[in-house]
Amino acid sequence: MIEHACILAGGRGTRMLGGAEQQPKTLMRVGGVFLLDHILVHLATSGVQRVTIAGGYKVEHLERHGFNRPRHGLDLQLIDTGLDTNTGGRVLALSSAIGDQPFLLSWSDAVSNVDFAAMCAQHQADSAELTLAAVHPPQRFGALRLHDRTVTHYTEKQRQSDHWVSGGYFVVNPSVLKMITGPECSWEHDVLTPLSQGGRLQAYRHEGDWQCMDIQSEWQYLNELVAQDRAFWPLPATHNQYQTMQT
């Protein structure tokens, strides 16, 4: 299992109304606990030992809440990668912390039960340059089948099992960072696209659960899952303490 992970937590969260306007989206609470804590616990329970967090928008809030100190058994390092730096540029800004060994890279706006150990093992077995977690996206709307003006079939929102999207998790060889030339570079456009066009991008197929938190209704949905004991991802121990205080 790869022991070092990096988390991009510097974006503004412009699609999230309310809380993310005053603080980074990663500090919005799910089940009474910061979203970033949920992501860290998933990494810790997978065998990761060291995490480097790429801060940006209101990075001082992350520092104030202790995300530059050991947490959940992880050694944490918080690096300010700039306010308007693009995704690829943020990864490049972590080069000194990354070193010369493969690392896990995670976006900070989703939860899942992706098996990171299995994903890393596949990456190493394939001698891959970059492996992304391919997930089935949840459907945001109910699906209709129409015949003229008549609805012949209605399906409530469910996972789209015939579609794959990037889950925002990657296993990366440091050599990939040579593709990033500056802070304006996009991870998606300047790294993933050319690698895929050259047949050099591998996918780890995750058939389990995954949910992003891009908009407020998705944040509410994640809180509902926790409240109803239906969370499918590893929960921080502090979640139980919070629940006890609320009862």
Image (cartoon, rainbow, N blue to C red):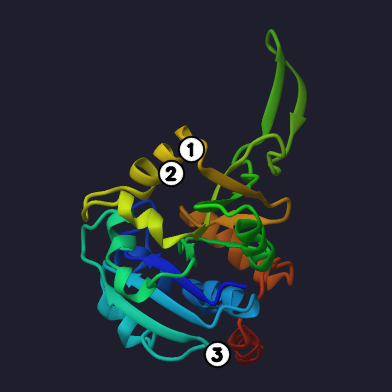
On the image, numbered disc 2 is attached to which residue? 192
Q: Amino acid at mark 3?
A: Gly
> What is the number of the mark on residue 73?
3
Mark 2 or mark 3, earlier in chain: 3
Q: Secondary structure at mark 2?
A: helix
Give the answer, above or below, for where 231 lies relative to 171: below
**Image position, residue 235 (x, y; %):** 64, 77
Q: Which mark is residue 196?
A: 1
Q: Residue furthest right?
A: 152
SS at mark 1?
Answer: helix
Identify which amino acid the numbered label 1 is placed on: Ser
Q: Camera-side residue: 3 or 224?
A: 3
Category of crowding for the residue at label 1, using alpha-carbon neighbours closer than 10 angstroms: few (below 14), some (14–19), many (at least 20): few
Instruction: Name the residue type under label 2.
Output: Leu
Look at 48% across and 37% down and name the residue there.
196
State the separation of the CA atoms marked 2 and 3.
Answer: 32 Å
